[in-house]
Amino acid sequence: MLKYVSLVLSGLTRKKLRTTLTFLSLAAAFTLLGLLQAVNSLFSGAADFLGANRLITQASTSFTQALPMRLMPQIESVPGVTAVSHSQFFGGQYGEGRSFFPQFAVNPRRLRDTYPEWVMEEDAWRNFVSTQDGAIAGRLLAEQNGWKVGDIIPLNSFIWTKADGTRLWEWRLVGIFDGKDAEWQKRANLMYLNYGQFDEGRVAGARGLAGVFVVQVADPNDSERIASTIDAKFENSSDETKTQSEQEFQLGFIRQLGDIGLIVNLITAAVFFSILFLTGVAMSQAVRERIPELAVLKCLGFKDKQVMWLVLAESFALCLLGALAGMLFASFVMQFLPPEFPITADAFVWGVAAVSVLVLTLLVGLPPALTAQRLKIVDALAGRAGDSPLELALRKAIEWPAMGWRWVMGRPLRPAETDA
Amino acid sequence: MSASHPIVEIRDLTKTYVRGKQRVEVLHGIQLDIPEGDFVALMGPSGSGKTTLLNLIGGIDSPTSGVLKVGGQRIDDYGADELAKWRAETVGFIFQSYNLMPVLTAQKNVELPLLLTEMGAAERSKRARLALELVGIGERAGHKPNELSGGQQQRVAIARALVSDPTLLICDEPTGDLDRKTADEVLRLLQRLNSEFGKTIIMVTHDPKAAEYARRTVHLDKGALVQEAAH
């Protein structure tokens, strides 16, 4: 089979510009496929506790349903749990609603216990604990907004109403925290608010609610058991819980947007439909131009099926090269995505790409390959080669309305044929 | 086999094309023997059926009726795959417009028929080189067809036809696109392949001067043999 490789590749180099453009289209399509299917893989994957040293316990119905504070001691009592904190999404808008960043109302001490990745001066931690209306901001966020310690940050919460009926909350910036390493430093674009002012300030009916619980575990390998134990504790109660890894929980936010898998698959399908036409036309044209050459191959003794396989192999080579380039580029791009969006081109994504290459090869390569197979040498050498099955189908689709019109007008169904 | 033993035996050969509702018989009951080692020129006006007859002898078309034996084998009832295999082993084709692969070098073009054999890459390369040297174009082995003159391209095509050592060379207007001087060179080469290497050559031509290089000429008119003449 290897002896045919140069023959197959030579077909691709015949029209370099067309091959390059088709290759680039395919590479672009597979870059998108790689990225989108990596997103799909991330969202459709089963809960993964591997290496999770922090769990999030939320209400089983939705993370928007706040859990009561009284669950915290029971969670803390689960063997293997080293620290528990609570966190409530605040949903504040800053600067006339044009600037949005995540804010969470937390207990400062517990935050420090469960998120040792955040580093801040000791004085700032102390001030955060002791200042009822205190807030701390990530370094990236503070730099972006030009904040400094002592500033008052007004936030208009679209979720939480104060007891006086207003939604504007003022927070005193008491510290600016950063990540312990480069990866966490990139994440320092959020804000923590002291739960004290938050709980006292909101309407009476909402007080005492914790939001979700952040659970620090001693041994990441024990995460799955601890999650099950926590959920079992509250099973069949009015506050059933769902405990999952921190990463899974973060994805839950994005899942609220809709059926991510469906959206991703629809975009992928649209991209491939376009590429199918582009590549299909290019391949058909490439074969049509080479009909006399294919006829010569048959003259030399190549069998019909061999010629068909040569054309199909050419489509496969082009699709494979485009897919490889696209997937490698997608993998490269993934390294530069923010850590909150940890997509990777795993085996599933490469599998989808491999299947796509095969399907695309068959769809774009088979019609011209069949044309090549059924090519009659004598007709091809005389320039009387027939249309491909795809072209025949299109011709029929165009002919039928014309024949209908002729029938209505009482004319012969086909124009008079002229013999060569 | 002796020189008089026919390599091509044709009996009552007809060929009918169906075009729409019309049936057009282009060859009517052809009887023809071509001895091994012969060099035959097929001549006749346009539409006389000479190319159709050549195509049938070369196994790239099938007769409607009659018997067509080449090298003692009846090829008229061969299937497509059998014919393809037979062509690869028995026939070399030379066309008017050379029909070389434009993206392949002369060397790679000549190697094409050898891809169908069990030969290794080194052996294929050696055989192709020898064929190119035989037709006097060994030094242009690395050139692509568009870097060669018409005469050189036709020599590459002849080398490709020869490389698998066929017994029969089928030439369809091999000098039709060449000037007189180059045409004479190509025809002398064919003559040499016939006389020195014993290749049986059947050549369709319109050109009486080209036909003079053959050992004999067979004339067709309106699908029938009308005259045979030895030179």
Image (cartoon, rainbow, N blue to C red):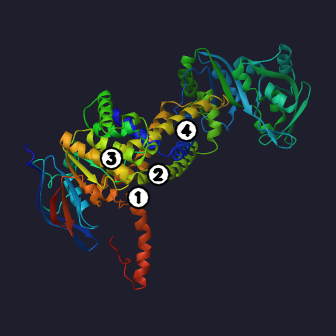
Quadrant position of the C terminus of chain A in the picture: bottom left
Q: What residue type is labelled 4?
A: Asn
The answer as to whether the residues below labels 1 and 3 share one chain is: no
Do marks 2 and 3 both belong to one polypeptide chain?
no
Residue A312: x, y in percent? 38, 45
Gap in angstroms between the C-alphas marked 1 and 3: 46 Å
- First in residue order: circle 4 vs circle 2: 4
| Viewer-closest of A59 and A382 | A382
Label 1 to label 4: alpha-carbon separation:
33 Å
The kind of secondary structure element at disc 2 is: helix
Q: Mark 4 lies on which chain?
A: A
Q: What element carries label 3?
A: helix
Residue B155, above or below B49: above
Under mark 1, the amino acid is Leu
Q: Kindly identify which numbered label has been placed on residue A280.
A: 2
**Residue under pointer 4:** A40
Foreground residue, B79 or A354? Answer: B79
Where's residue B203, x and y in %? 24, 54
* Mark 4 and mark 2 on one chain: yes
**Which numbered disc, 2 or 1, marks the residue that appears first in the sequence?**
2
Residue B86 shown left or right of residue B130 in the figure: left
The part of the image, by quadrant, that contains residue B54 is bottom left
The chain carrying label 1 is A
* Mark 2 burial class by Cα count in 10 Å: few <14, some 14-19, many 20+: many
Q: Numbered disc 2: what chain?
A: A
Of circles 2 and 3, which is in front? 3
- Callouts 4 and 3 in the same chain: no
Q: Where is residue A251 in the image (x, y as percent from the top left)?
A: 62, 34
